[in-house]
Amino acid sequence: MLALSRKKNEAIVINNNIEITILEVKGEQVKLGISAPKEVPVYRKEVYLQIQEANKAAMTVNADALANLF
């Protein structure tokens, strides 16, 4: 993991087309601004993990349904 220090209004660039800017710092909370191409999905980690779990559940249901066809 790369750890960087940034101040308000400073940014980092990832892969030449994603920019993350520090918008605000209040206590332990940091507000980020993310500029990325529309085809690049950006999720909070907890939402991303929920999507992954839903996808796994859907694959299991579909595999069971497929097995019942034969």
Image: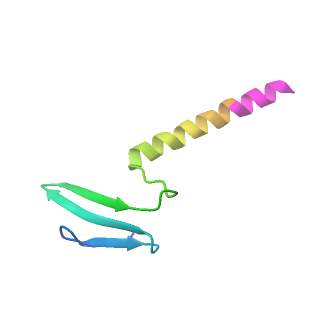
What residue is at 24 percent from the left and 64 percent from the top? Answer: 22
What residue is at 18 percent from the left and 70 percent from the top? Answer: 7
The range drawn in magenta is 62-70
What residue is at 47 percent from the left and 73 percent from the top? Answer: 15
What residue is at 53 percent from the left and 43 percent from the top? Answer: 52
Q: How is the image coloured?
A: rainbow
Q: Is residue 10 magenta?
A: no
Q: Is residue 64 magenta?
A: yes
Residue 3 seen from this side: no
* Name of the residue lying farthest toward the front: 38
Residue 70 sits above or below residue 38 on the image: above
Front one among 9 and 65: 9
Residue 8 seen from this side: yes
Q: Quadrant of the C terminus?
A: top right
Q: Quadrant of residue 57?
A: top right
Image coordinates for residue 48, horizontal then vertical, percent: 46, 46
- Is residue 10 found left or right of 50 in the rendered image? left
Image coordinates for residue 60, horizontal then vertical, percent: 66, 34
